[in-house]
Amino acid sequence: MTPTSEYQFPIFISLPEYNLIDLRAELAHILNVLGYRPILSSSEGFPDKTRKLQPWKSCLPVLNHCFVIIIIIDNRYG
């Protein structure tokens, strides 16, 4: 599949941490193939892996650099 995006737009994917793991991985893979740069809180280099901040607070600096935010809500929010 040829990437369709000329630029590597950062796209933040927000899902519950402990469920929907397969969906998260598949969505990140598809976005990568399309030429985007998916950002997940479970990704290498994500701010505050030490858990000193609440999860929503550690996402704020990342959201300032993302063009798109994808939020998927199941029976838990994330």
Image (spheres, rainbow, N blue to C red):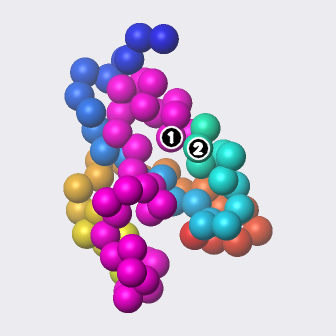
The verdict on residue 51 being magenta is yes
Q: Secondary structure at mark 2?
A: helix
How many numbered marks, from 0 up? 2
The verdict on residue 20 being magenta is no
Specify the quadrant of the image occupied by residue 27. Answer: top right
Mark 1: amino acid: Ala
Q: Which of the numbered marks, if any, corresponds to residue 25?
A: 2
Q: Residue at x 59, y 48 (%)?
A: 24
Label 2 close to label 1 by CB (< 8 Å) = yes
Residue 14: % across, % down: 51, 59
Specify the quadrant of the image occupied by residue 47. Answer: bottom left
Q: Secondary structure at mark 1?
A: helix
Foreground of the two, 38 or 47: 47
Disc 2/disc 1 C-alpha distance (Å): 5 Å
Q: Which residues are magenta?
A: 27-56
**Can residue 63 be seen by looking at this rendering?**
no
Q: Which residue is mark 1?
A: 28
Q: Residue at x 25, y 69 (%)?
A: 61
Foreground of the two, 24 or 44: 44
Mark 2: amino acid: Ala
Residue 49: % across, % down: 39, 74
**Can residue 56 be seen by looking at this rendering?**
yes
Q: Residue at x 31, y 60 (%)?
A: 45
Say left or right for 30 vs 68.
right
Residue 5: % across, % down: 32, 23
Say left or right for 18 vs 55.
right
Label 2 Cα neighbours within 10 Å, binned few <14 / some 14-19 / many ≥20: few
Considering only vertical position in the picture, is 60 above or below 53?
Answer: above
Considering only vertical position in the picture, is 34 above or below 11?
Answer: above
Q: Residue at x 52, y 30 (%)?
A: 30
